[in-house]
Amino acid sequence: MTEKPLPQVRITYCTQCHWLLRAGWMAQELLSTFAADLGEVTLVPGTGGIFTISCNETLVWDRKRDGGFPDAARLKQLVRDVIDPDRDLGHADRKSDKSKDTTSKDPA
């Protein structure tokens, strides 16, 4: 019997824009939340303002398409929706009384 391989997350970030720390922080957030449920989180250097996050080859975030960067809670929800849609993320899934924007916009 073979075990199903664990999901893989790939974060491609722009080295020209100095987004390594942002990519590393997002990787840490995912690894902390999905510790035993991810096979790997890979940081991939790129150029040209790229910042994309994919999970099992499914694009879950693209800075240009989605308009900025996801906050940690939104990113966790997007990855969860790919790897285990029924999983409860606790406080990251709770709705507040006020409508909040889940992205931080950047001028690029």
Image (tube, grey):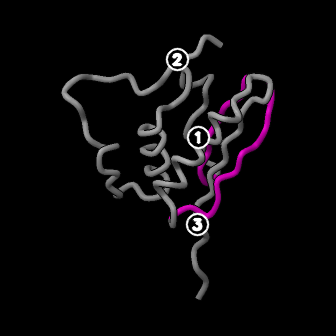
From the image, tell me which residue sits under label 1: 25
Circle 1 residues within 10 Å: few <14, some 14–19, many ≥20:
few
**Which of the 4 image quarters holds residue 85?**
bottom left
Which label's residue is closer to the chain start, 3 or 1? 3
From the image, tell me which residue sits under label 2: 105
Which residue is at the front of the view, 33 or 58?
33
Tell me if 37 is positioned left or right of 101 in this view.
right
Residue at 61% x, 83% y: name it.
2
Residue at 47% x, 32% y: name it.
71
User: Which amino acid, by three-letter code, is at mark 2?
Assistant: Lys
User: Which amino acid, by three-letter code, is at mark 3?
Assistant: Leu
Total numbered labels placed on residues in the image: 3
Circle 2 residues within 10 Å: few <14, some 14–19, many ≥20:
few
Inspect the magenta stretch and tell me whether residue 41 lies in it: yes
> Residue 23 at what x, y percent from top left?
64, 38
From the image, tell me which residue sits under label 3: 6
Could you say whether the residue bearing mark 1 is in a helix, strand or loop? helix
> Residue 78 at what x, y percent from top left?
47, 43
Whether the residues at callouts 1 and 2 have beta carbons within 8 Å, the answer is: no
Which residue is at the front of the view, 85 or 16?
16
